[in-house]
């Protein structure tokens, strides 16, 4: 006997609908929801930025900072004592500070890094791989690459073998995407004939080659973390022509779609790299490479591209000339709603309100910008940092300021 749907109790109907949805996702290979600890902190994909605890009183200066999706984080600290008369007598202590999930302050934890002589530079790199998980690497090139991994918020560290530990079919939650030398892991890019994509695993800090490799020439340049919509981006040169191309994966690296950018011209020298950033209403790509004419600048910006369909097709909105500003780019552009786009250049910031077609100069905005798991991060001064998700609202915090400092937000 059939029972009319209208006579089935509402709670039972809701339970049945939930079970059907779960079964449908399982049968179609739909992605499981992220663990609670890996979900972004309140604010949504392009909502308000998270509040980060103040760390102004930490010793030395911050040489690296990174965050997990829940707002917890790590930072490397360096405190140096110099001797101008005998530089070899100087030294630098390297420390680690950790912001635990929901904590109100940063805490100093165990550091695996050695003390440095005054003639040695601070070169350690930090990879945050999820709440309480991080990899610190030092060396590479002429020096042997060394690594240390923690899974308990920096309370203990263990050495990590820098050699690849097999292959992985996808990019795990919390992992970082990097390029490594295919023939000699740890070798610098300039001495490596061919690079490949690899994943730094949040499970043990080991590198694993990604099975699916996009066709991007010998030197792919990946973004270390995913964009807010979950997409992963890699730039490179089109095999055979060297023209600027980008690849995107929407299934955590299992497959890639490659698209060519309408670069200024086929006779131009190959670009150095292209950075991609996803905003509230468009995707932007910034091509960096050698410029013709004009004053020399660091990180020269050759062109900007805009996509309204997730990167399937692109329109070039900006081509840099000898006198057209912005002519350089510090990290990533900062996209906002309604065609807003901020570009931090070498000498000043610039803002567009029409998707990168025209710009006006700002009074400030020269800080370096990069993507983290909780939003775009910029360093405005030596110890002042700001986070944004929508390109408009910013949340400020301080790290290792030494002298008295104040912090605000917009």
Image (cartoon, grey):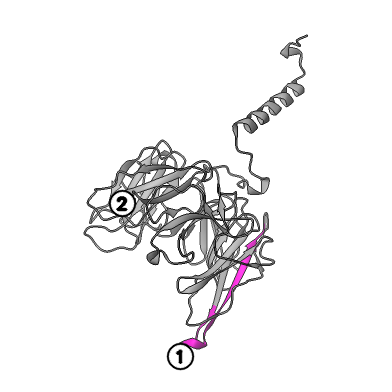
Give how far across and how far down residue 166 sits, in percent: 57, 56
Image position of 243 with respect to 406: above or below: above
Query: Which badge, 1 or 2, comes first in the chain's sequence?
Result: 1
Q: Quadrant of residue 345?
A: bottom left
Q: Quadrant of residue 104?
A: bottom right
Q: Is residue 87 covered in magenta? A: yes
Image position of 396 with respect to 10: above or below: below
Q: Which mark lies nearer to you, 1 or 2?
A: 2
Magenta-colored span = 80-100
Image position of 239 with respect to 26: above or below: below
Which is more toward the observer, 248 or 145?
A: 145
Give how far across and how far down residue 395 sits, in percent: 54, 53
Tag of residue 242: 2
Give the residue at x 69% y 66%: 155
Crowd around label 2: few <14 · some 14–19 · many ≥20 (10 Å): some
Give the residue at x 60% y 38%: 31
As measured in the structure, the alpha-carbon distance from the residue carrying label 1 to the one carrying label 2 is 50 Å
Give the residue at x 63% y 59%: 204
Q: Mark 1 sits on what residue?
A: 85
Crowd around label 1: few <14 · some 14–19 · many ≥20 (10 Å): few
Tag of residue 155: none
Tag 1, which secondary structure? loop
Give how far across and how far down residue 353 sits, in percent: 36, 43
């Amino acid at each position: 006997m059939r029972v009319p749907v209208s006579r089935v109790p509402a709670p039972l109907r809701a339970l049945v609908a939930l079970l059907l949805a779960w079964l449908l996702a399982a049968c179609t290979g739909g992605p499981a929801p992220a663990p609670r600890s890996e979900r972004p902190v309140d604010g949504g994909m392009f909502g308000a930025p998270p509040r980060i605890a103040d760390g102004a009183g930490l010793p030395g200066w911050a040489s690296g900072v990174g965050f997990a999706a829940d707002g917890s984080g790590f930072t490397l600290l360096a405190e140096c004592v110099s001797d101008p008369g005998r530089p070899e007598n100087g030294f630098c202590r390297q420390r680690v500070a950790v912001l635990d999930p929901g904590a109100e302050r940063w805490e100093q934890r165990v550091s695996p890094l050695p003390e440095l002589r005054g003639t040695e530079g601070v070169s350690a790199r930090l990879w945050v791989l999820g709440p309480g998980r991080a990899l610190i690497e030092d060396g590479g090139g002429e020096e042997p690459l060394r690594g240390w991994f923690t899974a308990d918020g920096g309370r203990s560290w263990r050495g990590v073998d820098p050699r690849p530990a097999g292959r992985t079919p996808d990019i795990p939650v919390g992992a970082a995407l990097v390029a490594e030398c295919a023939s000699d892991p740890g070798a610098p890019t300039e001495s490596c004939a061919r690079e490949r994509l690899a994943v730094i695993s949040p499970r043990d800090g080991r590198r694993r080659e990604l099975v699916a490799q996009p066709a991007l020439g010998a030197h792919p340049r990946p973004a270390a973390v995913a964009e807010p919509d979950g997409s992963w981006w890699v730039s490179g040169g089109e095999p055979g022509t060297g023209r600027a191309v980008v690849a995107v994966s929407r299934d955590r690296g299992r497959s890639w779609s490659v698209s060519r950018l309408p670069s200024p011209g086929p006779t131009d020298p190959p670009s150095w790299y292209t950075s991609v950033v996803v905003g509230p209403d468009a995707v932007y790509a910034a091509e960096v490479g050698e410029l013709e004419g004009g004053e020399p600048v660091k990180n020269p910006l050759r062109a900007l591209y805009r996509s309204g369909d997730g990167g399937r097709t692109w329109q070039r909105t900006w081509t840099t000339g000898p006198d057209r500003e912005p002519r350089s780019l510090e990290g990533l552009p900062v996209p906002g709603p309604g065609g807003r786009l901020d570009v931090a250049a070498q000498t000043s910031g610039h803002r567009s309100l029409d998707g990168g077609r025209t710009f006006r100069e700002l009074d400030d905005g020269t800080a370096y910008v990069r993507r983290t798991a909780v939003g775009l991060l910029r360093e405005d001064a030596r110890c002042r940092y700001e986070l944004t998700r929508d390109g408009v609202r910013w949340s400020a915090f301080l790290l290792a300021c030494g002298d008295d400092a104040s912090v605000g937000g917009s």
